[in-house]
Each structure stands twice: as structure tokens, then as C-alpha cells.
Image (spheres, rainbow, N blue to C red):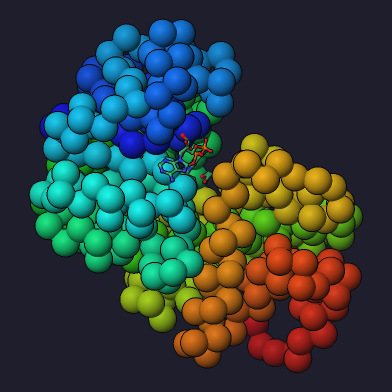
Amino acid sequence: MKIGIAGGGAFGTALAAALALDGHDIQLWARHAEAASDMQNTRSNPKLPGVDLPQNISISGELEPLFICDTILLAIPAQTLPAFLTEHLAHLDGKNLVACCKGIDLKRMTGPASTIRDIVPGAVPAMLTGPSFAADIARGLPTALTLGCADDEMGAMLQTALSTTSLRIYRTTDTVGAELGGALKNVMAIASGIAIGAKLGESARAALITRGFPEMQRLALALGAQPETLSGLSGFGDLVLTCTSDQSRNYRYGLAIGTGSDFDQNTTVEGAATARAVRQLASELDIDMPICTVVADLTENKTDVATALNTLLSRPLKEE
Ligand SMILES: NC(=O)C1=CN([C@@H]2O[C@H](COP(=O)(O)OP(=O)(O)OC[C@H]3O[C@@H](n4cnc5c(N)ncnc54)[C@H](O)[C@@H]3O)[C@@H](O)[C@H]2O)C=CC1
Ligand SMILES: O=C(CO)COP(=O)(O)O
């Protein structure tokens, strides 16, 4: 299996490093030619300080070497995935396309694997997701992920190919559950960051994580996910990680909202667009998604933290 990775950001580079250390020759594509050649020459990526990139990673700003690979990991932001797939459709047909991004596309209202299935019907769509910070993967720290692929035979091959001594991959055929768990937990991470930033306390964060989980399940199950997938690494596991660590950009974005601080708009924060997609889906499907809805409103300055808190706390009392 010849593995290529699209996306020379933190996650694409971290996956490249982990797989290269395991013996794979990796073709890494970075969008900006200059950044690609810097990475190729310095064997480093400023987004992963202190990580040396093994020599068996070839980094290029040209797409041709990537398209020679039969398996391509897509580590670009979820909202940019449809345009990339559409633009390069002819080259991606017939490939194993493994989405490594976490979000719901605002236009199509689909998670990354479903977006691949819709735009490149001739490809095998898969999803690699779960609790894992790029810096941890790149340093070879132990990590467990979920590989979702509806074609179980191909899923098993991808599971074997992408597992390393430190990267342990579990497998499911429930790609919808895998893609939605990873997307929705980012919204909850923003909510958790807001709670801590606004000094609402650790108990409030625990309440958000705990009530956020059934909220994630409600939408995911309505869209066809299996409950056990949501309870696994890609759902519950990543929810816990991202809501409790300031390594998470979604969490830090929430902290900035909660403290009223500025936040670098160039940072990849998938949960903001996903919250808006969820708000729309919830309204169309008539599903109660109160936390996601207030997060969406907060990211658009349609409400403030005090009002959002009041909205959540003044909801009718009900059974757990
Ligand atoms: N950083 C992390 O710890 C983890 C990230 N992820 C996911 O990986 C995905 C990528 O995140 P990171 O690599 O961390 O972000 P990043 O901000 O470090 O890198 C994003 C990369 O995508 C490229 N890019 C941006 N717009 C593009 C476009 N229109 N076409 C092609 N390429 C484009 C950028 O040039 C950059 O190389 C996100 O969905 C994120 O949720 C998943 C697990 C862990
Ligand atoms: O998905 C992640 C960890 O599993 C990374 O989270 P952030 O995108 O919030 O940094």
C-alpha cells in the first residue's frame, strides 16, 4: 500500500512522521510550495516544534507524486475538503481516501467520509479519527484511534497498514458514527473552554461534557450512527480529551470567548463551522441540541456568555 498524505499542517505531518518511523515511504503534499520545500530541506515543520521528520517522508507542493499513491490520507480542514475533492476528482477516483479531518460540511451537511462518498463515488471512503493530538502522535506517544470504513475488507487492510507500535487502530464499519463523533466533540470542546474561561467552574464543565454526550448521540443516531461508535474512541474518547486539554484549539477558542480575549483567526478551529451546521440540522430534523445551538450563536456574536448560560439553565427540568 503506497501512502500519501494531503495536508502539511500539524496532523498530516504528525501522521507522516509516525508512519515513516514505522517503515512506510510517505508522500506528503503541502499546499504552499515554499512551505513544502522548507519542510523537505529542514526536515521539520514549525507546527510541530522539536519533531525531526524522517528521511523517508518526501514533501512536495506538487500534487502529481501524491496522486501516484493508492491510499491518500486527507488531513486538510473539513470545510476545504469538498473543493479539494471536486477539483481533483479525476485523480482521486478508485483510491482509498481516508478522511483525517473532523467537522460537518456547512454546505452539504455531511461528515468527511460521507462527503468523499458523495463527491468521489469511485473511491473507497474511510475515516481516521479519535483522541490524538498531533504533537503526541509525532513524538510516538501511545495513541488509540478509530478507522471507519464501510467496506470491512478494505477497513482491515487500512487498519493493518496504518497501525504502528505506538498508534493502535480499532476498526468499525460505522463511518457515520466515526465522522460525527469527531465533528461534534469539537463543539463541546468550545463549550467547555467557554465555561472554564468564564470561570463557571469545573463542575459546570463536567455537566457540559456529560449532557453534551447524549446531545451528540441524539443527532448522530438520527443520522444513522451506531450508539457503540459514539461510546468509543471517536466519540466519548475524543470528547473527554478535547474538553479537558488546552492543547485543543477548539477548547482554547472557547477559553478566548469565555475570557473575552482575542483569538488568532488563522487557527484551525473546526467546531465553529460545525456548530452552525449542527444548529441548522437540529432545526431541520427537530432535534434538541441546546449546547451546540448556544455555541453556534456565541461564535457568531448572536448572544453573550451570560445570556447563553441563562438559556441553558432555564430550560424545563426533566428526567436524566
Ligand atoms: N492537530 C491535531 O492535533 C489534530 C487535528 N485533526 C484534524 O486534522 C485536520 C487538519 O488539522 P491540522 O493539521 O491540525 O491543522 P493545521 O492548521 O495545522 O493545518 C491545516 C493544513 O491544511 C491546509 N489547508 C488549508 N486550507 C486548505 C485548502 N483549501 N486546500 C488544501 N489544503 C488546505 C493548510 O495549508 C495546512 O497545511 C482538522 O480537521 C483537525 O480537526 C485531527 C486530530 C488531531
Ligand atoms: O481532534 C483533536 C484531538 O483528538 C485536536 O483537537 P483540536 O482541533 O481542538 O486541536
Any part of residue 159 in sight = yes
Question: Total marks drawn?
Answer: 0
Depth check: give the residue in front, 222 or 294: 294
Identify the residue at image location x=56%, y=14%: 50
Identify the residue at image location x=19%, y=35%: 67
* Residue 79 x %, y %: 46, 56
Q: Quadrant of the C terminus?
A: bottom right
Left or right: residue 169 versus residue 311 is left
Identify the residue at image location x=76%, y=73%: 302
Q: Is residue 86 above or below residue 160?
A: below
Left or right: residue 14 versus residue 26 is right
Q: Is residue 29 above or below residue 86?
A: above
Any part of residue 156 in sight = no
Depth check: give the residue in front, 173 or 50: 50
* Residue 219 x %, y %: 48, 76
* Residue 218 x %, y %: 49, 78
Depth check: give the residue in front, 37 or 239: 37
Identify the residue at image location x=88%, y=70%: 306
Q: Is residue 102 above or below residue 291?
A: above
Depth check: give the residue in front, 301 or 316: 301
Q: Is residue 302 above or below residue 55?
A: below
Q: Quadrant of residue 263?
A: top right
Q: Quadrant of residue 283?
A: bottom right
* Residue 48 x %, y %: 54, 23
Q: Quadrant of the N terminus?
A: top left
